[in-house]
Amino acid sequence: MHAIQARTETALDQRLPGKNIVPGKLHDAMRYATLGGGKRVRPLLAHAAGSIFDAPDTALDAAACAVELIHAYSLVHDDLPCMDDDSLRRGKPTVHVEFDEATAMLAGDALQSLAFHVIAAPGLIADAARQVRMIELLAQASGSRGMAGGQAFDLDSVGKQIALSELEFMHIHKTGALIRAAVLLGAHCGNADDAELGRLAHYANRIGLLFQIVDDILDSEADTATLGKTAGKDEANNKPTYASLLGLTQAKSLAAEMCAEAHAALDEFGPQARRLHELTDFIVARTF
């Protein structure tokens, strides 16, 4: 895990423009938002899924960077005053606080564009048609039918009573879509067939919801210093969460259910899926 995190940090550093390159302030903000923090769960998932199919590390580095750049851009925009209006991320000031709102907006935009620049690099994998599918997959996961759409639903739900099914729909898109993309992009790097991709998609849907349930529990139970972001922000903003909708006891029970279903979805891959099993347990046990 630490080796993949370090490898991803290096790969991101190599792909992000240096802050000495004009426009320096923008590039500085992009690097500030991306480097030196975060669990790198999505890159870990991409590498773990790719390892099932003996995917080359160079292709997995690109897939991992692409999905992490999308994730970084989403955090920059989520923290803006027009969204969640947060001042702390990964234990340091958010981008719009450290720089300014306009720079934060542009940094997010540029990180999103860089993600597609990375994954569209000629010759990333031998099968050009499969690479186009990867680009399409990342685009859908990021857009109105994925992460951005889930965020829109989230913003529209503030202060409202919503059903559990609506909360699940929101997080399948807001959080789950990019997690699913990470797993499937890794598998594509190793030439997984459609049946294998289908099984991994089911696994990814379970851990996407699992990740969000655990996130909601931590927001209720952990402190700001541990989380590296403002604790209790969802409750303060009257946002619907698994913890608020179900209560902490039922939310933890649902997390255990999602965890079991995720493990079961990997059964047909046998010992080759060991790293995905371990990451599933890490998501449950994490404290930040």
Image: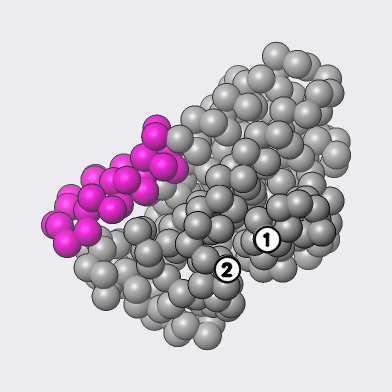
What residue is at 22 percent from the left and 53 percent from the top? Answer: 157
Q: Is residue 266 above or below residue 31?
A: above
- Near mark 1 (Cα within 10 A), the count class, few <14, some 14-19 or many ≥20, is some
- Near mark 2 (Cα within 10 A), the count class, few <14, some 14-19 or many ≥20, is some
Name the dominant secondary structure of the magenta segment: helix
In the picture, the quarter occupied by the C terminus is bottom right
On residue 99, the disc is: 2
In the picture, the quarter occupied by the N terminus is bottom right
The image position of residue 125, as x and y in percent, is 81, 25
287 vs 124, left or right, is: left
Q: Is residue 101 above or below residue 173?
A: below
176 vs 242, left or right, is: right
Q: Is residue 177 visible?
A: yes
What residue is at 77 percent from the left and 59 percent from the top? Answer: 19
Q: CA distance from mark 2 to mark 1?
A: 8 Å
The amino acid beneath tag 1 is Lys
On residue 25, the disc is: 1
Q: Is residue 205 above or below residue 134?
A: below
Q: Secondary structure at mark 1?
A: helix
Asked if disc 2 and disc 1 are in contact, CB closer than 8 Å, the reply is yes
The amino acid beneath tag 2 is Phe
Residue range highlighted in magenta: 144-173
What residue is at 27 percent from the left and 75 percent from the top? Answer: 236
Q: Secondary structure at mark 2?
A: loop
